[in-house]
Amino acid sequence: MAGDDLRVPPGPGNPGGLVVPGSELTERFSRSSGPGGQAVNTTDTRVELLFDPGASTAFTPVQRRRVLRALGESLVGGQVRIVASSRASQLRNRNEARERLVALIREALMPPPPRRRPTRPSRRARQRRLDAKKQRGQTKALRRRPDGEGD
């Protein structure tokens, strides 16, 4: 199963989808402390999935830069590390780790949002704001006692 390719469906920043060759993925299995009953002590259900996006042939140069920039702080030794151990089955943990990697790659491939163009309130908007403040002040002034007693 170590040779299975990982398919990343199309999305923003990834119009045609892409396939990460299974040879670029490293899977390690170990005993999990999670669910599994008595089998937890005898089977290697915990999955650790390692992927090096900087050396991957699946990305175009633009995609690689975008992924490395997005994942920069979460890379350990240049690799993405995903651990799955919440299931009692090795196959389910393996699928969960692969799904999480696909989601991570899809999110990293998203183009950056457009830059905000700073704007200023119009003269009319500023005038409306001042008028509203005056109106609130007058309303509050009407709530006061007319003779000033009780202040």
Image (spheres, grey):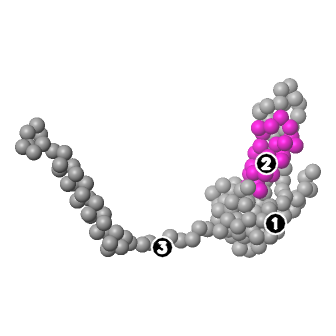
Sequence-wise first label, 3 or 2: 2
Sequence-wise first label, 2 or 1: 1
Of 145 and 91, nearer the camera is 145
Look at discs 3 and 2 and give the one toward the viewer.
3
Whether residues under marks 2 and 1 lie with C-beta atoms below 8 angstroms apart, the answer is no
Quote the CA–CA distance across marks 2 and 1.
18 Å
Magenta span covers which residues? 80-102
Quote the CA–CA distance across marks 3 and 1.
33 Å
Label disc, if present, on residue 18 of the rendered structure: 1
Instruction: Describe residue 95's horizontal placement relative to residue 120 as left or right.
Output: right
Of 95 and 132, nearer the camera is 132
Instruction: Describe residue 107's horizontal placement relative to residue 87 as left or right.
Output: left
Badge 2: residue crowd in 10 Å (few <14, some 14–19, many ≥20): many
Which residue type carries mark 3? Answer: Arg
Residue 80: where, in percent of width, then height? 73, 55
List the residue tagged with mark 2. 97
